[in-house]
Each structure stands twice: as structure tokens, then as C-alpha cells.
Amino acid sequence: MNSLQQKYASHKALHFTESVIREMSRVAAKHNAINLAQGFPDFPAPQDIKEAAVKAIMKDHNQYAITWGAKALREAIAFKYQRDYQITLEPEQQITVCCGSTEGMISSLLATVNPGDEVIVFEPFYENYGPDVILCGATPKYVQLQPPEFSFDPDELKAAFSDKTRAIIINTPNNPTGKVFNKAELQLIADLCIKHDALAITDEIYEHIIYDAAKHIPLYSLPGMAQRTITINSISKTFSVTGWRIGFVIASPEITQSIRKVHDFLTVGAAAPLQDAAAYALRLGADYYEHLADFYGQRRDYMLKELKQAGFACLQPGGAYYIMADNQQMGWDNDVEFAKHLAVNIGVAVVPGSSFYREGAKDKHRFVRFCFCKEFTTLEAAVERLKKL
Ligand SMILES: Cc1ncc(COP(=O)(O)O)c(C=O)c1O
């Protein structure tokens, strides 16, 4: 950063760097590398969902929707949560549609967290959470997800809670580790939230990208948690439309009031015609989700097999569409150097794992993250290039 950049930056903006994930997409383009870095599909979105969006535009749904979301979309969200999880939601009071779950997360944090509060974050973490907490003037407290299983030590979690804890952020299924939090882990988190009167903010964007016997359990559904859980979700990953920027937040009516205020002044609202298409998508039947899990399951199995063949040690993800691969096994101590080598000399872009860890974390430089939400032809081409390693 040069001195002018420094001069005009706020204290908060000085406290975090630009997104490494998004940067790696630019690096991939520059070096003509296959982009297995940023988590977006390279295949078409479902035809009927695109047609629903086109229809909404042609019907002239082109002006601002209600700031907290088109009624049809909020009703479709309530319908889906009732059908899939037997969770009853009041669309008029408990659902806020945002510009992606990205906006859902920062709006929720700004609406509920005060400067000086502590927010517990599992590490490695999806890289937005660090800057989000800093933008609130709060302090992140990290709890390790320890490789190879990415499990956490219950005592470490208990010790992280204090009278300063305002919230804990949970992401399940998890990016970058692929961990799916099980019932016992979620129950412990719930018990601690209740004991310390803390909020649970759960990012459940990969709820339907889940493998084998793993089961997604919304924390909201655990006894005593509906009042203190803020559930963040989005259609980005489930319907392969990451560029549409339609997400939503579910919370109690009381918490929703604050979130809606912040959301309104941050963005006014998400794209109106795309909200109509999202309402259509969320009413699709269970077969859509079964197909999705199977589609990604095949890609997970293929990439795991090939990465292991290439010499990487990696854990089988239970959900989401990423694999954390150990670069130390490949003779590289530094993930950033290794990711650079992969992009420039091998022609495959990945995300250096350090972007999911704070400064000084034990495993900061140990991993690179491969994403596999791509056509088989893309993955096969990447595997071919990795043979040069
Ligand atoms: C865990 C997690 N949360 C949120 C997002 C961003 O979601 P959205 O497109 O809904 O803003 C991502 C994108 O990769 C993610 O992995």
C-alpha cells in the first residue's frame, strides 16, 4: 500500500486485505490457468430458473421490490423451511432478502454486534468473516478446527466464551474444510450460546451440497435456539447462480427488525426480477436437491482420487465443494508460494489456505484449497496439468 492509499483509508479498512479468493480468479485469468480457486460453477444454470427470471423481466418486475424482499420469495422461503426442516417461519416478520448471503452476514453483524464485543469464529474460516467482524468494531476470537478431521476441542470452545461474547459464527457445511457439524457439536454450541446469552449466526449456504450419510441440521431447529439464531442462506450455490446476488436471513421478529434497517440503508434491496426467479427455484421438489448432491458427489470422488494420486494428503469433505490439500506433503512449506507455482507453472489456480487463517495461526501455510464445482472436462484438464507436479 502506498502512502496516499494509506492516508485516505479508514482505520477499519487498514485492518484487512482484499479478498485472496477473488484475487486468485484474476491471477487465473492473467496466467491462463484453470480456475479451481473461486467457488462458482462453469456450467449453465438450470434452464427453467433462467426462464423464470426472463419472464419476470418481461412482465416488467423491474422496479424496487419491498426492501426486505418480494412477498412471493419470502413465502417460498417459509414453504421450503417448513417442508425440509419442519421449521415454521412468519414471512412478514422473520425473513429478510439480501444481496447474497454476503450482505446477509454483514447486515446481521452490523445489526446485532457492538464495538468491543467478541465474536467467536471457527478457524479456518470463510474469509469474509474476519473483515465483517472488524467492520463492526468487534474482536474475533478463534477456535481451531483441527486437521486432519477438522474437529474442535470442546474445552477450547468453552474457554472462548466469556461475558464479552456477543455471537458465534458457524458455517455448516463448511468452506473451506468440507466439515458438516454433527448434532452433538451443534448441541454443545447451542448450550454455550444459551448459557452465555449469545447469538448464533449460521451460514448454511451449502445445505444441499452434502455427501454420504452426512445430514444438515439447522441450528435454529435445536430447542431454545429459535430466539437466538440468525440463519443466513442464499440461492447462489444451490441453484448455480452466484452472480444473481440473492440471499436471505432468517431470525426472530425482534432481531429481524434491526437487520432489516441495516439492510435497507446498505443496499435497499436485491434485484427484483431475480427474486421472482428465486421464488420459483425454492419451490422445486426434492429431486432437484438429490440430483445436486449426486452431481457434486461424483466430482468430489473424482478429485479426491486424483489429488491423492498426485501425492496430496486430503480429507474427504462431507459437504460443500472444496478440498483442502496439504501442501507440506508435496514438499512446499508455504501455501502462497505453492499456489503461485501452481497457477504460473502448472496452469491450475487454487486458493492459498492462509487466506482462511489469521496471522500467526499454526496451520496458516499448510494447505491449498481446490474447488470442484466445475464441468468434468474442466476438472480432467486440471488433473492432466497437475501430473506435471
Ligand atoms: C461459506 C460461504 N458463505 C457465503 C458465500 C457467499 O455467498 P453469496 O454468493 O450468497 O453472497 C460463500 C461463497 O463462496 C461461501 O463459501
Image: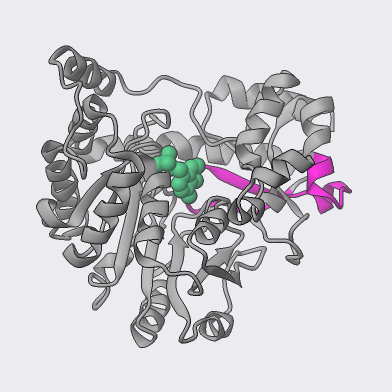
Task: Tell me what residue is drawn at x 59 percent, y 55 percent.
Answer: 12
In the picture, the quarter occupied by the C terminus is top right
Side (left or right) of 202 relative to 94: right
Relative image position of residue 374 (x, y in whole percent): 53, 28
**Residue 323 shown in magenta:** yes
Q: Position of residue 325 (x, y in %)?
A: 70, 48
Horizontal and vertical percent position of residue 197:
35, 82
Farthest right residue? 331
Which stretch is magenta?
Answer: 313-338
Residue 387: image location, x then y, percent: 80, 29
| Quarter of the N terminus within the rendering | top right
**Left or right of residue 137, residue 270 in this image:** left
212 and 180: which one is in front? Answer: 180
The correct choice, above or below, for 4 with respect to 156 in the image is: above
Going 36% across and 87% down the picture, which residue do you hit?
Answer: 195
Above or below — where is 385 with respect to 154?
A: above
Residue 181 visible somewhere in the drawing: no
Q: Quadrant of residue 306?
A: top right
Q: Could you tell me if residue 345 is visible in this image?
A: yes
Residue 75 on the magenta span: no
Horizontal side of 34 relative to 261 (left or right) equals right
The residue sitting at the top extreme is 58
Is 262 situated left or right of 21 in this image?
left
